[in-house]
Image: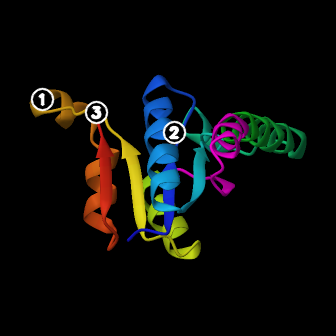
Amino acid sequence: MYEHLLVPVDDSELSDKAIETSVGLAKLLGASITGFTVEPPLPPMVMEQVAIAYTAATIQDHQVSCEAHARKVLKRFADRAVEAGVHFDGQFMVTEGIQQAIVDMAERQKCDLIVMASHGRHGFDALIHGSLTKSVLSHSKLPLLIIH
């Protein structure tokens, strides 16, 4: 049925639900998992309507910090998968375009199912906060399993 799951995660309790569900599902199906996390880039620095460039050291420090955080998030996921006997690969990216990064990573890794946790926001709350899950659903050709 499904052989390779893409599971986007961050460092939240909601992601913990996606981890537990996807590991159980992958074990049941004999599937592998690609865990994926996205780190934010440095925001543009503007002072009095003039863009200012970051120093090379600041950019490098940010990259090191992003990589350290991603490794921490993905290690916890990898440990859980290995404990259950599920093949795991961890990937991360630094980008603002989270939904497109998820879709692109699923294609790049040849995944056949995306597993995501969602807050299940509706109405005004969804309008204000947006829905990453809805955006991935509308941009991906793959099936999406949503965990509330």
Q: Which residue is mark 1?
A: 124
Numbered range of the magenta stretch:
75-96
Q: Nearer the viewer, residue 25 or 9?
A: 25
Upstream in the sequence, badge 1 or badge 2?
2
- Find residue 98 and report its horizontal and vertical position in percent: 48, 52
- What distance separates the C-alpha of mark 1 from that of mark 2? 28 Å
Q: Residue furthest top?
A: 13
- Give me the residue at 59% from left, 46% from top: 37
Q: Quadrant of the N terminus?
A: bottom left
Visible residue check, residue 109: yes
Q: Which mark is residue 129?
A: 3
- Tell me the quadrant of the picture where the C terminus can be found: top left
**Residue at 32%, 53% in the rendered image:** 145
Which secondary structure lies at badge 2? Answer: helix
Q: What's the CA distance linking mark 2 and mark 3? A: 23 Å
Percent coordinates x, y for residue 38 in the rendering: 58, 47
Q: Residue furthest left?
A: 123
In this figure, which residue is indicated by the disc labeled 2? Answer: 19
Callout 2, which amino acid?
Ile
Q: Is residue 136 left or right of residue 23?
A: left
Label 3 Cα neighbours within 10 Å, binned few <14 / some 14-19 / many ≥20: few
* Magenta segment includes 88: yes
Q: Is 30 in the magenta? A: no
- Up the image or down, 99 lies above or below 4; here it is above
Q: Is residue 98 above or below residue 64?
A: below
Q: Is residue 93 above or below residue 14?
A: below
